[in-house]
Image (cartoon, rainbow, N blue to C red):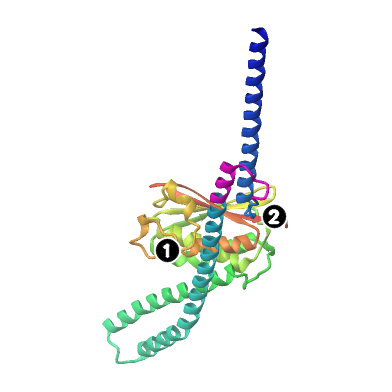
Amino acid sequence: MICFIVALIIMFGIVVIHSWYRNRKMYHTIDHMLDEVLNREKITVSDIKEGEISALASKVIRIQEKMEGELVQAEIEKEQVKGLISNMSHQLKTPLANVMMYRELLEEESTVSGQEQLFLAKMKQQLEKIDWILHSLFKMVRLEQGAIIFEAVSSSLKKTLLGAVNAVYEKAEKKNIEIITEPFQDCMLYHNSKWTVEVFVNILENAIKYTAAHGRIHIRVCPMELFTEVQIEDNGIGIREPEQPDVFKRFYRSKEVENKEGSGIGLYLSRLILEQEKGYMTVKSEYGKGSCFSVFLQNCQI
């Protein structure tokens, strides 16, 4: 009787050990397959013999092949869109330049009435907006393709910020918005002044656009160990928290501002410029109270 019980215990132990070993092997096989999927490697089934695992592996392979096909197709479509945007931007430049020239000729006519002059002035504003969008699209595509390469050199931050503030001063003045640059000691940072001015202008123009009349925009410079942070803070409408990660995406526009003029290009273009300078930007915002965009520029080449 004792021998029978001992035999049962041994048999039970063998079954448990076999089951544990089989499950452990199954776990490692599945884990290995998932690693191959995550690393976008071809799944190998040569060493998979067990029926259940083999069937699972076949399904995973089919999913992997489908995902890879969709990624390739998405990349093709992305390149096609880039080509279309680049071609459209190029093709529309000449007709737009001609329309702007005809408008100027009409404006110079002495027979043009006061009301017609007003219409021509409005036409000029709209044509300038179209021209800006076309130029921005062209720059965006060329930056994405790596066709525009500029060097970040040691440049004065104060000079760059002054250039950006001067560029938007008239727009701020029309809304009685005060731009306050808090005192800071000038520093030499690695950036391309011309392109970084465009980054600050894009942020400042958004701040002016989404801030009510008589508002304020504060510019602060905060030196850090490897980077210098430039904060541009407004007391405008703010951005809802779920939307904040999306504001730097191409063509993204919040539903909150669909009734306002804009293209969804400026912040994305700014991100591309900063990436080429090995800098970056972030945003903190409280809806209804305002936003603070931070631009980080290198103190030294990394």
Image coordinates of residue 230 in percent, x first then y, are 58, 53
Three-letter residue code for mark 2? Asn
Q: Which residue is mark 1?
A: 173
Say which of marks 2 and 1 sits in front: 2
Tag 2 secondary structure: loop
x and y percent of residue 288 in the render? 38, 47
Judge whether residue 200 can be spotted in this image.
no
- Residue at the top extreme? 1
Which region is colored magenta?
45-59
Judge whether 85 appears above or below 184 on screen.
below
Front-lying residue, 67 or 234: 67
Q: Residue at x 63, y 66 (%)?
A: 193
Identify the disc placed on residue 191.
Answer: none
* Callout 1 secondary element: helix
Q: Earlier in the sequence, mark 2 or mark 1?
A: 1
Dot 1 amino acid type = Glu
Q: Callout 2 environment at 10 Å: few (<14), some (14 to 19), or many (20+)?
A: some
Circles 2 and 1: CB atoms closer than 8 Å: no
Q: Residue 245, how many percent across, how many down? A: 49, 51
Residue at 57% in and 63% down: 272
Mark drawn on residue 299: 2
